[in-house]
Image (cartoon, rainbow, N blue to C red):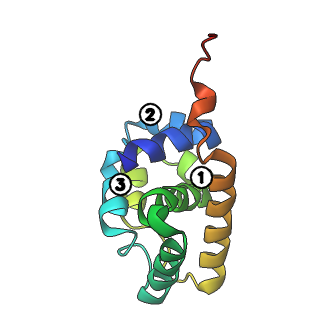
Amino acid sequence: RMVMRLEELIKRIDKDLALHFEQTGIQFIQFAFKWMNCLLLREFNLSSVMRLWDTYLSEGDGGFEDFHVYVCAAFLCQFSGQLKGMEFDELFQFMQNMPTEDWTDTEIEVLLSQAYVLSTLFGGSDAHLQSQTSA
């Protein structure tokens, strides 16, 4: 479910990236399943993961389920320009080993800020997509 929400969110915020994934045959389940199940533990160093998870905890009940999807979307968008220039093999390999080994607290803070903006803009906005019926 979280993977599907990530895919829908990317389709709304970066249509070109979503289209590129579709055209190259990359499916969100191929990389995002790991992101959702491991909560980005494999993508970042431990101190960065602790910072992310601390934010998730401060978000309350929805932090690990809801806010995490926005973090993943912001994370994916960080690399959008690079990803759009890759074909399947390079893209698949890149997605399995994201280049975050040099990330510091600064990059994590930017990521969290971008995720917060996305959550503010798109959180609960699914209702806007449904047709209104008059009574």
Q: Quadrant of residue 115?
A: bottom right
Q: Is residue 105 left or right of residue 100?
A: right
Which amino acid is tagged 1?
Answer: Ser
- Name, please, the residue furthest toward the front: 135
Vertical side of 5 occupied by 59: above or below: below
- Report whether residue 85 is seen: no
Q: Residue visible at 54% across and 76% down?
A: 58
Label 3 packing within 10 angstroms: few (<14), some (14-19), many (20+): some
Report the disc number at residue 48.
none
Q: Residue visible at 41% across and 72% down?
A: 43
Q: Name the residue under label 3.
A: 31
Give percent across and percent down for residue 117. 69, 58
Report the disc number at residue 80.
1
Give percent across and percent down for residue 95. 41, 58
| Residues at circles 3 and 2 in contact by the CB criterion of under 8 Å | no
Which amino acid is tagged 3?
Answer: Phe
Q: Name the residue under label 2.
A: 22
Between the C-alphas of marks 2 and 1, the distance is 14 Å
Give percent across and percent down for residue 98. 45, 67
Between the C-alphas of marks 3 and 2, the distance is 14 Å
Q: Earlier in the sequence, mark 3 or mark 2?
A: 2
Which amino acid is tagged 2?
Answer: Glu
Q: Quick one: SS at disc 1? A: helix
Q: In which quarter of the image is the C terminus?
A: top right
Vertical side of 50 occupied by 111: above or below: above
Q: Residue visible at 38% across and 42% down?
A: 26
Q: In this view, does 11 lie to the left or right of 33?
A: right
| Residues at circles 2 and 1 in contact by the CB criterion of under 8 Å | no
Q: Residue visible at 42% across and 60% down?
A: 94
Q: Nearer the viewer, residue 7 or 60?
A: 60
Q: Quadrant of residue 124?
A: top right
